[in-house]
């Protein structure tokens, strides 16, 4: 299957995409990973991306699309792929549609992981790492025994600097303004599959497989 994953930061897109990749031999295509690999490899697109990043600029859609185009022409995508983190806005969605048509490929579904914003805020601002064990925890959702175990091991619960309410709130606002319009776009195209993204990860994964007929 050829899938786009939609959802706000903290909705669990990356985690669930990795499970589909492992179980169904799909390829996860992350724009962040593509950028890092292209820069490390010193490709033409990688050099152009590095110039933009070094100048403190956003990497252009043209460069990102070029990287995705190159990736989609490799033979391992024949078993299916998941686009994670792209498109982020309507302009990118239109460009992706044109590019896929040129390559003779078409999307099968756009999966939206739908999670209330108050839950997303707790998922993101509540993230902590135990300084002793390195275990990822959440002050809102992890069992109290697991949180206490960190202190008992001599560790502290450390919060990432960018996991504060102001930064997370800004990220969610950007998602609302730029990415939420994609929901209507993919719905009109008959591709949207909405999945309740709250609750147990196994239950969410079962819902995803259900809407995809897997």
Image (cartoon, rainbow, N blue to C red):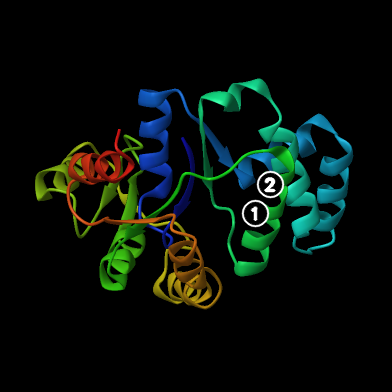
In the picture, measured across the screen, residue 30 lies left or right of residue 20, that is right
Q: How far from the left and from the top, in percent, is residue 29?
A: 57, 39
Q: How far from the left and from the top, in percent, is residue 204?
A: 23, 46
Say which residue appears at 80% left-offset and 55% top-offset. Answer: 62
- In contact (CB < 8 Å): disc 1 and disc 2: yes
Q: How far from the left and from the top, in percent, is residue 31?
A: 63, 46
Q: Nearer the viewer, residue 87 or 110?
A: 110
Please indicate, yes or no, whether residue 105 appears anywhere in the rendered image. yes
Q: Nearer the viewer, residue 186 or 28?
A: 186
The mark total stands at: 2
> Does dot 1 land on a helix, a strand or a loop?
helix
Q: How far apart are marks 1 and 2 (CA)?
A: 6 Å
Q: Name the residue under label 1.
A: 97
Q: Residue 157 carries which label?
A: none
In this rendering, is residue 200 above or below 41?
A: below
> Does dot 2 land on a helix, a strand or a loop?
helix
Please indicate, yes or no, whether residue 59 appears anywhere in the rendered image. no
Q: How far from the left and from the top, in percent, is residue 67?
A: 74, 42
Say which residue appears at 10% left-offset and 44% top-offset. Answer: 145
| Quadrant of res 45 | top right
Q: Mark 2 points at which residue?
A: 101
Label 2 Cα crowd, 10 Å radius (few <14 / some 14-19 / many 20+): few
Q: Nearer the viewer, residue 79 or 12?
A: 79
In the picture, measured across the screen, residue 196 lies left or right of residue 35, that is left
Label 1 Cα crowd, 10 Å radius (few <14 / some 14-19 / many 20+): some
């Amino acid at each position: 299957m050829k899938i786009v994953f939609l959802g706000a930061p903290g909705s669990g897109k990356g985690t669930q995409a990795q499970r589909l990749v492992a179980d169904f031999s799909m390829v996860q295509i992350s724009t962040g990973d593509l950028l890092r690999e292209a820069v490390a490899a010193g490709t033409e697109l990688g050099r152009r991306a590095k110039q933009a990043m070094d100048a403190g600029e956003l990497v252009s859609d043209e460069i990102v699309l070029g990287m995705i185009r190159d990736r989609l022409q490799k033979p391992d995508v024949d078993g299916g792929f998941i686009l994670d983190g792209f498109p982020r806005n309507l302009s990118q969605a239109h460009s992706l549609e044109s590019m896929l048509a040129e390559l003779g490929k078409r999307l099968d579904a756009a999966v939206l992981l739908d999670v209330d914003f108050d839950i997303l805020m707790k998922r993101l601002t509540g993230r902590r790492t135990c300084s002793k064990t390195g275990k990822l925890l959440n002050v809102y959702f992890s069992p109290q025994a697991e949180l206490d175990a960190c202190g008992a091991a001599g560790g502290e619960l450390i919060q990432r600097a960018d996991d504060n309410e102001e930064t997370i709130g800004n990220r969610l606002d950007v998602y609302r303004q730029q990415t939420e319009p994609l929901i209507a776009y993919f719905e009109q195209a008959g591709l949207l599959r909405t999945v309740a993204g709250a609750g147990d990860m196994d239950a969410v994964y079962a819902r995803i497989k259900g809407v995809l007929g897997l």
